[in-house]
């Protein structure tokens, strides 16, 4: 397996434990689990940003991705600590994080389509699969947190079901693409 993908397995174990613990409301403090959701968002931004940076060959590009990821994490922390509060869901931070990830993935796609050879099979190219999963997850979460903010502040819950289902579907797509990427790695290893 490629070294850029090795941290996905511990991260997936963390996500499974995190979701299991939240399913039983074991992380409730002050009648909310928003605090751990806020921290998980920063962790996801950091890990996905590092992954996207590792896909590019140019050091200058990687440094820019590191700086953008760090800036997004700092802006998120400022929102969590000073603007919306640690115990409340930091929707502004989530919007910042997901918009940064969408832009980084789109830039990666642009460089992939312009720089790599024409014989590249994208359907079995693991970095493309994972980046596509990150894109779907980020778009779904962006939509959810944008509508969540609107619904809370306007007290209008007409879009709640749609807003709640889209991140779940995008997460399913991400996990499926990540699994397929691991299968492609295993196939490539067997072929050698």
Image (spheres, rainbow, N blue to C red):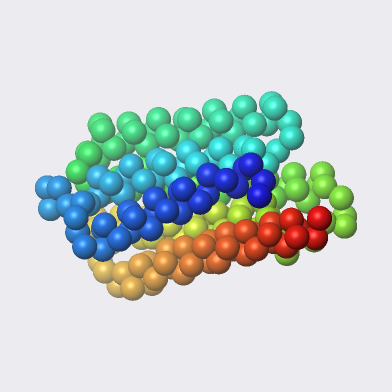
Question: Which sits in the foreground, 38 or 78?
Answer: 38
Q: Quadrant of the C terminus?
A: bottom right
Q: Residue at x 31, y 49 (%)?
A: 37
Q: Which residue is drawn at 37% across and 42% down?
A: 93
Any part of residue 97 in sight? no
Question: Which sits in the foreground, 167 or 174?
Answer: 174
Q: Position of residue 66 (x, y in %)?
A: 56, 30
Q: Position of residue 188 (x, y in %)?
A: 75, 58
Farthest left residue in view? 30
Q: Quadrant of residue 78?
A: top left
Q: Which residue is drawn at 39% across and 46% down?
A: 41
Q: Position of residue 51 (x, y in %)?
A: 58, 42
**Relative to 105, is 94 on the left or the right?**
left
Question: Which sits in the foreground, 43 or 114?
Answer: 43
Looking at the image, how many numbered discs can be counted on the residues? 0
Q: Position of residue 115 (x, y in %)?
A: 82, 44
Q: Which residue is drawn at 46% across and 54% down?
A: 12
For residue 68, above or below residue 26:
above
């Amino acid at each position: 397996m490629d070294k850029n993908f090795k941290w996905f397995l511990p991260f997936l174990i963390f996500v499974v434990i995190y979701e299991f613990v939240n399913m039983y409301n074991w992380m409730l403090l002050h009648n909310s689990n928003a605090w751990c959701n806020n921290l998980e968002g920063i962790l996801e931004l950091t890990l996905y940003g590092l992954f996207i940076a590792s896909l590019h060959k140019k050091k200058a590009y990687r440094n820019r991705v590191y700086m953008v990821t760090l800036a997004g994490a700092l802006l998120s922390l400022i929102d969590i600590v000073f603007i919306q509060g640690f115990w409340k869901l930091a929707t502004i931070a989530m919007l910042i994080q997901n918009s940064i990830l969408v832009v980084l993935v789109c830039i990666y796609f642009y460089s992939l389509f312009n720089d790599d050879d024409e014989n590249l099979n994208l359907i079995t190219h693991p970095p493309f699969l994972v980046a596509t999963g990150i894109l779907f997850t980020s778009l779904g979460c962006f939509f959810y947190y944008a509508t969540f903010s609107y619904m809370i502040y306007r007290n209008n819950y007409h879009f709640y079901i749609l807003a709640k289902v889209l991140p779940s579907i995008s997460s399913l797509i991400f996990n499926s693409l990540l699994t397929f990427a691991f299968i492609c790695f295993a196939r490539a290893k067997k072929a050698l």
